[in-house]
Amino acid sequence: MWSIDELQEVWQLASKLHNGQKYGDRMEYLNHIGSVTFEILNAVNHEKDMNADLAIKCAILHDSIEDTEQSFEDVKMLFGQQVAHGVMALTKNEGLEGKEKMMLDSLSRIQQQPKEIWAVKMADRICNLQKPPAYWTNQKKIKYQKEAQLIHKKLKDGNKFLAARLERKINEYVTFIE
């Protein structure tokens, strides 16, 4: 079970950490955080035996180590070891060369985590499979779709509901490829 008071605390922190960040067509980055969290909340309603507390906290914080000054130790101190390890697994290792290596490394670390972390990664990609920015080339769109297929292949056993949603989004993404 999750505590609304704890989730409010996590949300307030995410709001401060991502304040001023933008994505896509200059939208507030907190919209992305909310979208991923909504996907997780929806999955909680469709999947039994899901640790909603872990999944929701990691959804809210999934980009905090990667995109802000928040550290693993900060997350661990505030929300515990399990949440910190989940968020860390969702964080790209920028020390690796190339996006493909970073993605494979992250997926490997995610697979070592509870299934709720798998669900957060699928939810994140579901939210990112919206209309791509106008400046993306067709080649980039195709590469992004293939990366989504890899995520689906590696993590689909973590949450059947989100795996089905991700598969639908991947299939719908072809409408953006010329």
Image: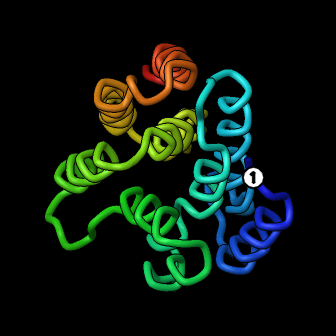
Amino acid type for the residue under numbered disc 1 = Trp
Q: Is residue 41 left or right of residue 49?
A: right
Query: Residue visible at 53% across and 15% down?
Result: 168
Report the colour scheme.
rainbow
Query: Residue visible at 66% across and 52% down?
Result: 53
Label 1: which residue? 2
Q: Is residue 141 left or right of residue 41?
A: left
Query: Residue visible at 56% across and 38% down?
Result: 123
Q: Quadrant of residue 33?
A: bottom right
**Vertical position of residue 123 compared to residue 178: above or below:** below
Q: Is residue 57 left or right of residue 121?
A: right
Crowd around label 1: few <14 · some 14–19 · many ≥20 (10 Å) = few
Q: Position of residue 129 (x, y in %)?
A: 54, 33
**Vertical position of residue 122 compared to residue 105: above or below:** above
Secondary structure, mark 1, is loop
Q: Position of residue 15 (x, y in %)?
A: 75, 72
Query: Residue visible at 61% across and 80% down?
Result: 78
Q: Is residue 175 visible?
A: no
